[in-house]
Image (cartoon, rainbow, N blue to C red):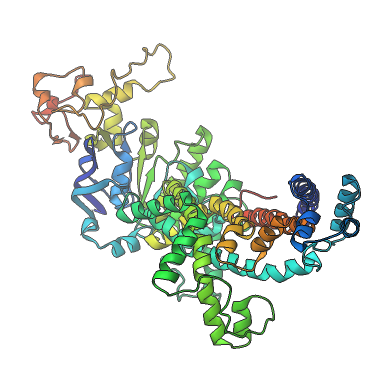
Amino acid sequence: MQAARIIERILIAIPIILGIGVVIFLIMRLTPGDPVDIMMGQAGHVSEREVELLREQWHLDEPLIVQLGHFLGDLLRGDLGMSFTKGRPVWALIMQALPATIELAMVSAFFALAISIPIGVISAVKQDSLIDRISMAGAFFGICMPIFWLGIILIIIFSINLDLLPTYGRIGSDVNLQRITGFYILDSLLTGNWEALKSSIRHLILPSITLGFPMAAIVARVMRSSMLEILRNDYVVMARAKGLNEFSVIVKHAMRNAMIPTVTVIGLEVGMLLGGNMIVETVFSWPGLGRLVVSSIFVRDYPLVQGVVMIYAFTFVFANLVVDILYTYINPKISM
Amino acid sequence: MLLEVNNLQTHFQLTKGTVKAVDGISFHLNEGEIMGLVGESGCGKSMTLLSLLRLVPTPGKVVGGEILLEGKNLLKKSNREMTAMRGKDMAMIFQDPMTSLNPVFKVGEQVRESLAIHGYFRDARRAGKKRYQAEKERVIELMEEVGIPSPMDRYYEYPHQFSGGMQQRAVIAIALSCEPKILLADEPTTALDVTIQAQILSVMERINRSHGMAIIIVTHDLGVAAEYCQRIAVMYAGQIVEQGLTDDIIEQPLHPYTQGLLRSIPHIVPDKPRLKPIPGNVPSLLDLPPGCNFMPRCEYAVEECKEPQDLRTLEDGRKVRCIKYKDQGGVSNE
């Protein structure tokens, strides 16, 4: 794909992200509950004067349209503002939580793809076999099941009953780890801290299964159905007639083609992993973006919610762009 | 004899019953010969070819007979031996070139793959070149041979950048790459328009001459068979109903079905009588008549046709599956 086309796509993304900014700005303001009231309510006895000062400081006394103008103007300069409740720049809070979210999403995606693609392929090749029936029933379960319920059930089984894995957090409280990148697996490898590596992997297992399972279920089903379609093609018979062994026929000739529709789904799902992890992070007390946004919604911390949602919007737009670029590589019929 | 097929049976086990797609087919192929397998859609021609390579799709299965390639029975070979044989001893080309090439690989690479999997140039370095380079050179030669213009550039193109005719040439180049003894061509020109048809067939004929490659052409077009094949076998509902030299069959068809086929070909001659189609339809393979399969549509049907008929060999070596010729030297009453 030409660089010019990529730049064009990025430029198109800017108004999309700004549009999402306007929507989230308005939704937050339309939500009942006022950040100053919530904060003052928690603080107890406060004077009228203090309330007014706070409103002034947070620019809540200005007309809505002016506030929006400030928000969008700051956004274009890359400034997400100050958090109402935490007293720190939103950007710093996001950067602190982002590695946790990315680490969880990447491990979940890896887990999901590592099981779903082979399962999809095997189910298609052995259509209607026992393996196919069992895995498709499992996939159906994965699609239907509420994610918080799976998380809680896994905690009950593996943490409470079997006492094998921790129930919350990213790392054991008794483990010391020097933070370099914020990705704990990477940090413990860099510092050669095996204790921390073991602890962070143990903490990742349940959340990543919970988060990755629905994605695995969808990808397995898409992979299976697109494989089934591809296997009916003449070029698969042709590949066999050339003298290729069955493994090469499936993996090289059929899978390459079956990946084309699957990549679209994977791209959207990876966006979901990064943006749709609020429930899992809350269930497992995972200190990432999802938990940050949920807690800031409760206290109506407008700048923080807006900032995190902007990150989510950016992630989705970026994931789609990556899919489009990948698409031109795996499908020679498409050029951007 | 290069290839001898005896009593080949390929059945599809369906819940509704057994479909005998190939029902006891016997024929042979001589070295360097072009043979035609002619019949309507669904008569088992394609399944016969796929059976030869043991590539019948499930739930189909070769359930009986033997396929002797240079005396060795292919049905007794292991899967691994079959894989090594495919493409190398017997190659196949398909009806629709648009779908026989893999859309995600470069055309040249698809031709090269055949050379690579069968280990051509594995050690034999060609004029001091590396293996990949040697394979690529051979691919370009092959593409040139089948008439793909500027093969150097087209090596790197994808199938969708080729026209139908060019795609079929590329498929032929793949089949030709390992110089197999036999080329199985399943309706190679059906999906192409008439001028391209003639070009593709002449490419195949040229390969037949220059490489001495024997070819089985499966076609529903008696005209194609008549022009390019030395011998023809006519199939109907999974069986061969007539077999013989092309000239004999065209000039004096024996089986009522062959006669019917020939009568339904339009001729460009003045005062030719109206075309006479064969009445009725091909029977469902799930519900065949008990005796001769053609009996319900046959104008000569007699009581004895309710019994299964054998493929009789006549005195002149022709074979026909019809009661009319039970006294051996029977002649057509056309």
* Horizontal side of residue B78 vs A280, given as left or right: left
At horizontal 36% and vertical 42% (from top left) the residue drawn is: B217
The correct choice, above or below, for B227 with respect to A35 in the image is above
In x, y percent, where is residue B97? Answer: 49, 44
Q: Residue visible at 62% across and 54% down?
A: A327
Task: Give above or below for B301 relative to A20.
Answer: above
Residue A240 location (% of width, % of height): 39, 55
The answer to which of A98 and A89 lies nearer the viewer is A89
Q: How many marks?
A: 0
> Does B251 sit left or right of B272 as displayed?
left
Q: Nearer the viewer, residue B180 or B94?
A: B94
Q: Quadrant of the N terminus of chain A?
A: bottom right
Q: Is residue B122 visible?
A: yes
Q: Residue at the spot x=40%, y=39% of the render?
A: B187
- Taking the image as shown, residue B100 lies to the left or right of residue A73, namely left
Which residue lies most toward the front here?
A45
From this view, report whether residue B123 is shown above or below residue B34.
Answer: below
Q: Is any atom of residue B157 visible in this view?
A: no
From this view, report whether residue B196 is shown above or below residue A304: above
Q: Nearer the viewer, residue A313 or B32?
A: A313
Image position of A233 (left or right of A71): left
* Percent of width and height locating residue B185: 39, 45
x, y percentage for residue B78? 25, 63
Q: Name which quarter of the figure residue B307 lies in.
A: top left
